[in-house]
Amino acid sequence: MLLRPFWTFLRGHSSLLNSPFFPVVFSLSVYLSFCLPFLLLDSLSSRWALVRRYKLQSQSSVSWASMQSCLALTFYNHLVFIFPLTVMHWYLRPAYLPEEPPTMPCLLAQVLVCLLLFDFQSFTWHLLHHKVPWLYRNFHKVHHTYTSTSALTTEYSGVWETLSLGLFAAANPIMLGCHPLTELAFFVVNIWLSVEDHCGYDLPWATHRLVPLGLYGGARHHDLHHLKSKYNYAPYFTHWDCLAGTLCTQQD
């Protein structure tokens, strides 16, 4: 009952949801919307000590040139590579919008399972690209251009990395047979967590502070990976790094 009004509203705009343009516009809009608050913090951190105290690398700053470079690569990857693939997907697998929404417990459970699957896939992919020099040099090195993370570095990646991680994210809801609303919810949560991972701030309300027992790494966890590339390969949770002996929780 909680999701029915929202799902009814979305079904009323089915022509938009079924458009081949929707996935790219949706992805870019959500991504840039989540980046904006952190870009505001970046603009304030150089002259406001209260903001700078939460910055993970307080000596670093985000330049206009780096923001333009990140945005240019993001738009390039989406328009030149992701958009043609979404058109092909739209043609081969037309969207089906069932009349009934999922239940809230089902949606939350499946979003969590999708996140756990994506976390494992990304951990394996990430570890492999660091352990095999050829893979790192030719594919993953682009993402490590910046040793100090900021929101827009989230999608500063080569086309191979962008498409492969995008494939994981797109395939998991399909494998689980998720409702389209669950799929949308997972995409939003996944984009938010990715941006938060790269935001460069350890804020009081950050996700890792809400998850108990250190099970979730968050921005500090991933920022340490950019500083020390031999640790913290999982994007979100910490259990795979703990099991692999690649978990690092603080700077030396």
Image (cartoon, rainbow, N blue to C red):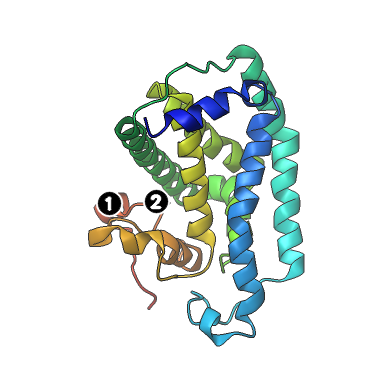
Q: Is residue 119 left or right of residue 18?
A: left
Q: Is residue 245 above or below residue 164?
A: below
Q: Which residue is mark 2?
A: 234
Judge by depth and name the residue closer to the eye, 203 or 115: 203
The answer to the question of whether label 2 and label 1 lie on touching residues, with beta carbons closer than 8 A, is yes
Q: Residue 68: where, in percent of width, then height?
A: 76, 60
| Res 216 quadrant in image | bottom left
Q: Is residue 84 left or right of residue 202?
A: right
Q: Is residue 53 above or below residue 128?
A: below
Q: Amino acid at mark 2?
A: Ala
Q: Along the polypeptide, which appears first: circle 2 or circle 1? A: 2
Q: Which residue is mark 1?
A: 239
Seen at 44% across and 43% down, the residue is 122
Seen at 65% across and 52% down, the residue is 32
Seen at 48% across and 25% down, the residue is 180
Q: Residue 55: where, in percent of width, then height?
A: 51, 75
Judge by depth and name the residue closer to the eye, 14 or 24: 14
Q: Is residue 73 left or right of residue 110?
A: right
Is the residue marked by circle 1 packed among few (<14), some (14-19), or many (20+) residues within 10 Å? some
Q: Can residue 116 be seen here? A: yes
Judge by depth and name the residue closer to the eye, 47 or 134: 47
| Res 217 quadrant in image | bottom left
Q: Residue 190: where, in percent of width, then height?
A: 47, 44
Q: Can residue 156 be seen here? A: no
Q: Is residue 148 above or below residue 84?
A: below
Q: Amino acid at mark 1?
A: His
Alpha carbon of mark 2 to alpha carbon of mark 1: how far? Answer: 8 Å
Q: Which mark is on residue 250?
A: none
